[in-house]
Amino acid sequence: MIAHVFVDAENIPPSVTFKVVEHFGKEHTITKVDIIAKEDTLPYKYRNLDEKIYRVQNCFYGKNSADTWLCFEMVRAIIDEPDLELIIIISSDKDFLPAIKFAVDFDKKIFIVSNGAGHKTLVEQLKILNVNPDAVELKDFRFKFGDVPSKLEKFLPMLSFRIKKYLFDCEDRIKFIFVKKGNQIFEVPFVVGMTINIFGRILRELNILSYDDSVRNFISKNFLRLTRSNRIYFCSEAELSAPTHAEQIEKYFSEHAEETIKIFIKHNSKLSEIPFVNGMPLTLFGRFLREKKIIGRNSSAIKIAAQSLLDVHDGKVYLIAEDELDAAQDDLEIDLEVYFAEHTAEIRTISILHDGNIFSIPFVDGMPIKIFGKLLRERNIIDRKILAEDVIADNELVLRGDKVFINKEASE
């Protein structure tokens, strides 16, 4: 195509101009490059160029004189150059919209090369002017815009600099996939192994998801897989054919219908009644709580079980035996922080030996056995099946009544 280049030299460095001219000159015949700027602000690299191609236009004075002059030269070129097919504008301003409208009305193709910051606004303004979007292409000179997949071009005006840079850096790995939201199908750029944060930003910047929509739910509904490291991959054939979490839960309770009972789960001071099978897998227990939105994805199923008087061992969840229930209820009533806050001046650190391991714990001489037992359980030194009294017997401690003391005779 026969092309004429117009450069707003007041906001475009020479390196960008020469890069653009070189790139487009490979595919088009550039007859003239108009460099428009005030004489006293013209960079030295714009001087002493080949006058057969480059023409420096002194726009004299005035805040917007370069934009006005650029529009004027565009209109003159359209009228005086009958063979002109392509107009290339290199500028980061948007004050040349009337000239673009004029050029498109005369069936000219337009390339606008800028820093990309105003592309989204520019697209909206072109729509208001009823400019044929197919006649205008936007390119961001901050990236190498020569070898970008043509399918990616249409997304660029809507994407932020950070996302565009990410996609340009991964251009050899970009795939274009179709995703569904509701009854609508969208095509989006996708990089296998991209993080959920990047994917979420792409979906929101393309107005597919709002900030209230869950990216995780969107991923699971579109046959994608999210790993523990929050990276996204395509589902394998085995994963696609595997039952969903909801189906797995339904199947489990169906197979254990006779063993299923109702229990209450405590979370954030709220009680929820749920079906439960004594000895059910911890993963399934947590999955059920999340499916029912009783807990969030970052909540610990083990912690919820402990708060709800359930016992977890060997990867399974059990009801606490009656002989352990009293101790568990006592634990719920005991607040270690309050106790130690009330005895700050008396706290000392001692070493406890249990199962061949040594643990350092805070200790108050004469502390109640119930406080001592809960402390050992919270520190995972013992479980509910081990008595605090057994630990006392194995260490330089002594139980007098219901209180624990340092055994001074043994320590001496």
Image (cartoon, rainbow, N blue to C red):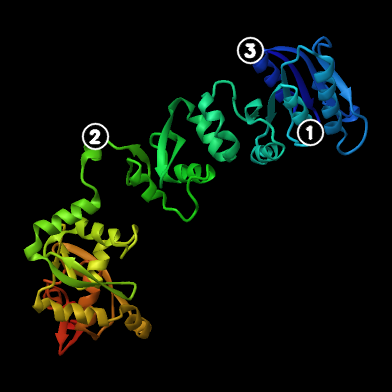
**Residue 130 seen from this side:** yes
* Tag in front: 1 or 3: 1
Q: Earlier in the sequence, mark 2 or mark 3?
A: 3
Q: Secondary structure at mark 2?
A: helix
Tag on residue 27?
3
Q: Residue at x 62, y 27 (%)?
A: 134
Asked if the residue under mark 2 is in contact with the one under mark 1, i.e. CB atoms within 8 Å, the reply is: no
Residue hosting label 2? 237
What is the distance, in whole Å, between disc 2 and disc 3 at their CAs? 44 Å
Residue hosting label 1? 98
Write down the quadrant of residue 20 in the picture: top right
What is the distance, in whole Å, between disc 1 and disc 2 at their CAs? 54 Å
Figure quadrant of the C terminus: bottom left
Residue farthest to the right, as pictured: 60
Q: Is residue 19 left or right of residue 174?
A: right
Which percent across, then down, holds residue 225?
Answer: 32, 42
Q: Secondary structure at mark 1?
A: helix
Up-down relation of residue 6 to residue 228 (above or below): above
Q: Residue at x 23, y 79 (%)?
A: 331
Q: Earlier in the sequence, mark 1 or mark 2?
A: 1
What is the distance, in whole Å, between disc 1 and disc 3 at their CAs? 27 Å
Q: Earlier in the sequence, mark 1 or mark 3?
A: 3
Up-down relation of residue 29 to residue 277 (above or below): above
Asked if the residue under mark 3 is in contact with the one under mark 2, i.e. CB atoms within 8 Å, the reply is: no
Which percent across, then down, holds residue 89?
Answer: 74, 26
Crowdedness near tag 3: few (<14), some (14–19) or many (≥20) residues, C-alpha within 10 Å: few
Crowdedness near tag 2: few (<14), some (14–19) or many (≥20) residues, C-alpha within 10 Å: few
Name which residue type carries label 1. Answer: Pro
Residue farthest to the left, as pictured: 258
**Residue 412 seen from this side:** no
Name which residue type carries label 2. Answer: Glu
